[in-house]
Image (cartoon, rainbow, N blue to C red):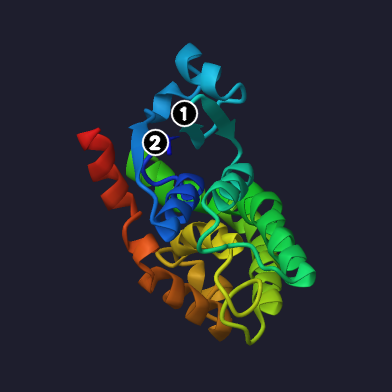
Amino acid sequence: MSEFVVHTIPGSPFGRAVLATLEEKGARYRIAPVGPGTLKSPEHLARHPFGRIPVLEHGDFRLYETQAIQRYLDRVLPEPSLTPSDPRRAARMDQVMNVNDWYLFQGVASVIIFHRVIGPKLMGLSPDEEAIKGAMPNAITVFTELARLLGDRPYLAGDELSLADLLVAPGIEFFTGTPEWARLGAPHANLAAWLGRMLERSSMRATTWERVAELAQAA
């Protein structure tokens, strides 16, 4: 099978979701690092016309959008399956993945994690406390709903790991290092326990910001 190449930036939760999916499949892959300031460069726009990451290359096939990449990998690498066979559980997986993209990232992580983690770590910026405060009502709604959807099951779509878990966990982990975690994640024991299980998986340990940065540097 042709090599999998993932164009990403170390620390990207979306890039990590793809890498963790490949790890769960036991697939070999190579990281093609993308510089944070090069997303709008002609070279990268040729890969992704909207200037985002990640991008997957598999032989002569190129694909962007994290959910599409994850689903593609689950089809071309069918074992172990990461999509529930039960239609309702598969639908729950799809729902949670869309909650991640539309509600957890947009207006929540894109604000809180930017001001708490990305801006200070990569750009030397001070957090905008008013922006963070403004994002908190939506953040509380998102975390409360994810905890409700998880319920007493071990994974977000049921009893088995799915693509939804691999997509959501990287973004949620960022919050654990912020003051906001006390109001968002800590009150939901089931969600905190789920995250703990996820972070113990070898796929997550192999795709930390630090580990991906090492692989990118060696590329």
SS label for mark 1: loop
Task: Tell me the tag on residue 59.
Answer: 1
Q: Is residue 36 shown above or below 199? A: above
From this viewpoint, is residue 124 visible?
Answer: no
Task: Tell me the tag on residue 157.
Answer: none
Q: Residue at x 35, y 37 (%)?
A: 31
In the picture, residue 161 is in which quadrant? bottom right
Q: Is residue 175 shown above or below 156? A: above
Q: Is residue 119 shown above or below 187? A: above
SS label for mark 2: loop
Between 84 and 199, which is closer to the camera in this rendering?
84
Q: Residue at x 79, y 71 (%)?
A: 88
Mark 2: few/some/many CA within 10 Å (<14, 14-19, 20+): few
Residue 29: horizontal and vertical position, in percent? 36, 42
Residue 89: horizontal and vertical position, in percent? 73, 71
Task: Tell me the tag on residue 3.
Answer: 2
Residue 135: horizontal and vertical position, in percent? 64, 55
Residue 154: horizontal and vertical position, in percent? 56, 81
Amino acid, disc 1: Gly
Instruction: Give the side of residue 87 with respect to residue 180, left or right.
Output: right
Instruction: Tell me the CA gap for discs 1 and 2.
Output: 6 Å
From this viewpoint, is residue 76 visible?
Answer: yes
Question: Quarter holding the C terminus?
Answer: top left
